[in-house]
Amino acid sequence: MDVYFSADGGLNWAYQGSHTGWYGDKWYQLKAWIAPEFRTNQFRVAFVLWSDFSVAFDGIYIDDIEIRDSSTFFFFDDMESGPGDWGQPVTNWDYFASLDGSSLDSWNSWNIPINANYLWSEFRVKFVLNTDFSVNHDGVYLDDVGIGRAGPIDTHAYLDGTSMAAPHVSGAVALLAAEHPAENLENRIQRILTGVNQLDTLTGKVVSDGRMNLYESLIAGPPELCEGNFDTDTDVDGMDLQTFAGGFPSDLSLDLNGDGVVNEADLARLAAHFGRNECP
């Protein structure tokens, strides 16, 4: 194991020495002198494990790190509950996956899904290096470890049906309302219906027998609505005249000019549209 010091938060590292060998399954105290040039508020220490093929053992366990002089502790971490926040030792671990082989001197991304039963506040993860005598290389470098949830992926797909058509037409009506704010809702509907491209494949399948053409709907003049089509059968005929006669003069739904009364002026407007077929 090599020991390195840094005086600038890890930008530059200086080798301080190595420790190797077997200590008979016992804890052994190791010391390293911190030279004055490293005694800054950006001081960092790194332990680097090197493995080779000569001996196959666990590696090195590190515990109770101290930075001190003869009388004062400047830093202490017992690796369980100290400032390093290692937490209490975890006794139950589940193996998930392994990675070996060479990355050809490049960083590789590695993703592992976390099962739902691990998603709680006491979740922990650890990486264990196993060494043997087959290959003599550096080992494994870890960087940019993250735990998160994948965000939505923006993709395009072909969809059909009324659930797709409804928002499409609703957006068109909103645009028509912005371009022609003085028109009422009936006029906007008629702009959509009269601006369609007629298609034989849609005949009898949709009300307009065509496909919406927003450009044509935008540039078209205001549609002339039928007046007097009281039964909404798309024709202004004798049935509508009979309805008018039956409600005259008290039924305000027959007020065609919007003056608040039902009189001869409304009858005149009905007469002007009488006989029209396929009324919008």
Image: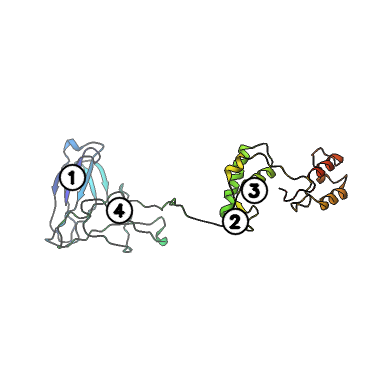
Asked whether disc 3 touches disc 1, contact meaning CB atoms under 8 Å apart, the reply is no
31 up-or-down from 161: above or below: above
Residue 53 image-quadrant placement: bottom left
Mark toward the start of the polypeptide (4 vs 1): 1
Q: Earlier in the sequence, mark 3 or mark 1?
A: 1
User: In the image, what residue occupies the spot 56% across and 53% down?
Assistant: 164
Q: Is residue 152 left or right of residue 87?
A: right
Q: Which residue is the site of mark 2?
A: 200
Q: Position of residue 134 (x, y in %)?
A: 15, 63
- Circle 2 — which element? helix
Instruction: Say which mark, if any, is on residue 193.
Output: 3
Position above or below: 177 against 152: above
The residue carrying pointer 4 sits among few (fewer than 14), some (14 to 19) or many (20 or more) residues within 10 Å by Cα, namely few
Q: Which amino acid is tagged 4?
A: Ser
Question: Which mark is in front, 3 or 1?
Answer: 3
Three-letter residue code for mark 2: Asp
Q: Kindly identify which numbered label has been placed on residue 162.
A: none
Circles 4 and 1 in contact, beta carbons < 8 Å: no
Q: CA distance from mark 4 to mark 3?
A: 54 Å
Identify residue for label 4: 109
Q: Is there CB contact under 8 Å for labels 3 and 2?
A: no
